[in-house]
Image: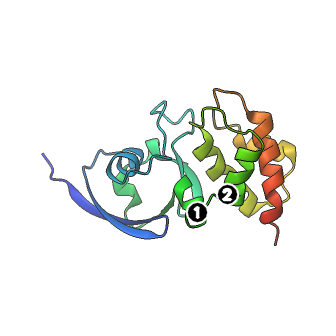
Amino acid sequence: MKMPRKITFTVNGVKKQVEVKDNELLADVLRDKLQLTGVKQACWRGECGLCTVLLNGKPVKSCLILAVEANGAEIVTSEGLMEGDKLSHLQKSFVENGALQCGFCTPAFTLVTHYLLTQKPDASEEEIREYISGLICRCGTYNEIVKAVKQASQYYKK
């Protein structure tokens, strides 16, 4: 049996060293070992997208990534979108537009739409809908999510 190994990565701007087993998922390490509870797990097979994080700047489903694959990487979770101890403009926009009900899916939606807006701040409603189509909101707040993203897009324009 292999011994656990230490890996190092930067999470939300802070360098972390964690001991992991070869088969541990990144989602489990972030949530259970680092207490980053914005990382949600619902399907454990990459279908719902609720475990999405930004890995080296791109959205990935952390339930499909082994923690050892993230060694040396830069990771951003929804907690990393905050501005100090305050919600980011995008996160505030989700609240203001009722784009969350139970809130379980909100961290993944904010990360994915943050990435979209950094790439395309003038994204159309159709582009936003296409981009969020890989995430599941069981409360069905998709219209409100689109409104929130459109409202927050002004803060991404250079």
Q: Report helix, strand or loop for mark 2.
A: helix
Q: Residue furthest bottom?
A: 158
> Residue visible at 31% across and 45% down?
24
Query: On screen, 79 above or below 43?
Result: below
* Quadrant, the C terminus: bottom right
Pointer 2 with pointer 1, Cβ within 8 A: yes
Horizontal side, residue 71 vs residue 79: left or right:
left
Compute the Cα span from label 2 to label 1: 8 Å
The residue pinned by badge 2 equals 115
Coordinates of residue 148 in the picture (x, y in percent): 78, 47
Residue 54 visible in rendering: no
The furthest residue to the left: 1
Relative to 118, is 108 above or below?
A: above
Taking the image as shown, residue 101 lies to the left or right of residue 153, namely left
Give percent across and percent down for residue 101. 66, 33
The answer to which of 89 and 31 lies nearer the viewer is 89
Determine the residue positioned at 55% across, 32% down: 47
Residue at the spot 48% in from the left edge and 70% down from the top edge: 13
Disc marking residue 57? 1
Question: Camera-side residue: 134 or 28?
Answer: 28
Residue 119 location (% of width, % of height): 74, 62
Label 1: state its secondary structure: loop
